Image (tube, grey):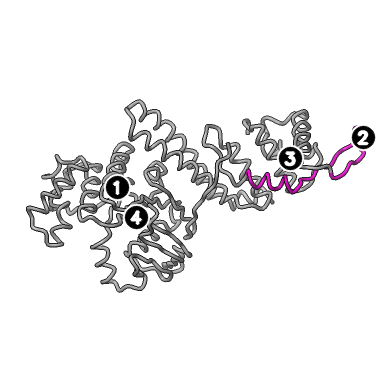
Amino acid sequence: MCIVLSVTIRHTFLGLLEQQPRHGYDLKREYDERFGSDRPLHYGQVYSTLSRLLKNGLIEVEGVEPGDGPERKRYTITDAGVTDVADWLSRPEKPEPYLQNTLYSKVVLALLTGRSAADLLDTQRSEHLRLMRELTKRKAAGDLADQLICDFALFHLEADLRWLELTAARLDQLTKVVTG
Amino acid sequence: MSTSLLTATGLRKQFGATTALDGADLTINAGEVLAIMGPSGSGKSTLLHCIAGIVPADSGSVMYQGRDLVAMSDSQRSALRRSDFSFVFQFGQLVPELTCLENVALPLRIDGTKRKEAERQAREWLDRLEVTDVADHRPGEVSGGQGQRVAVARSLIARPRILFADEPTGALDSLNGEAVMRLLTEAAAESGCAVVLVTHEARVAAYSHREVTVRDGRTRQAVGALND
């Protein structure tokens, strides 16, 4: 999982905090294990993300515990944060290259937070098909160059759709792995 | 586009111990192209067969012009299929002993149209589907793509209200499949005919106006605004 956008880090943290309150270190470890194995987060990224989430009222500090080094803050999600996660998970992504990483994160977070990953995949499939319809119309009205350009995009979107279909077929299996 | 033509509600269908449909719902609007998608074994072809009156559902309703197909007798369903519906399948739908022109003219001939008039109209449909040059060939002498275009011409000549197409490009390569879909959807739109298209191919479904996904015998429709 080498390409995870910063917007995804923000929502991923929120999703993990919705599952349960955590310290910053736990969040980083959980994130790296699940979503960033070949590109772990820097501590700077973790604390700047937490600071933005705090500032926006999406998380709050539940408690502070003394440790060997600096004090450890325990973060918990607010109602506004839960709404933010729900909104993000329910909206399809704009179809574009390397989307699988974001979609994979969304599927795992939906399962972790007890939401319907099947609905999420169906909504995304619908969005991909909407774009494929647009391209198909453009192709019908265009010259050969337009047709070839649209075909390139159509084949890539079709590959995404196969991934969505395969993931939908493996949801039971994935649920056991993620929540087990 | 939003006038409902056929509405299926709570369709259930069992084959022995296997549940093929488990409460499927579907609406077909006048003049639209609707894709039914889903993985193999999801129930999408059974759904098409039930809404087209090919097989009766065990329960639920299929309302078409104020009548319920599920409650009709076999002969009533057959009559409705002949008058209002038509079908395109993946293979083997043309009569091998007849020429392509005679195949296309067949639905009109069965309805009593004189040969000359039926063949005049059939020739027009072959022109529209861009296969004029195969008119005098038998189906065994034409390519798969040409054969499917002839089948589409035959399915539309009697001006059905709904064309049911089950994997119509399943046996064709990409180029021929796309040509068939383009011509099928254009010809259906010109005739004001709704198309219900069963496919597992997204590029084929992209010719539809909207899609319904079947999973485990149930229909799912997804909506949502975009994450930018």
- Which stretch appears magenta? A62-88
Identify which residue is drawn at 31% across, 48% down.
Answer: B168
Q: Disc 3 versus disc 1: distance between alpha carbons?
A: 53 Å
Magenta-span inclusion, residue A67: yes
Element at badge 1? helix
Residue A22: quadrant of the picture: top right
Label 1 CA crowd tier, 10 Å (few <14, some 14–19, many 20+): some
Q: Is disc 4 in contact with disc 3, using a CB cutoff of under 8 Å?
A: no
Find disc 2 in the rendering and name its residue.
A68
Element at badge 2? loop
Identify which residue is drawn at 17% across, 47% down.
Answer: B139
Q: Earlier in the sequence, mark 3 or mark 2?
A: 3
Q: Disc 4 versus disc 2: distance between alpha carbons?
A: 72 Å
Identify which residue is drawn at 15% across, 56% down.
Answer: B106
Tell me which chain the residue with mark 4 is part of.
B
The kind of residue tagged 2 is Asp
Q: Disc 1 versus disc 2: distance between alpha carbons?
A: 74 Å
Find disc 1 in the rendering and name its residue.
B189
Find disc 4 in the rendering and name its residue.
B30
Q: Which of marks 1 and 4 is nearer the N terminus?
A: 4
Element at badge 4? loop
Q: Which of A13 and B194 is in front in this view?
A: B194
Find disc 3 in the rendering and name its residue.
A30
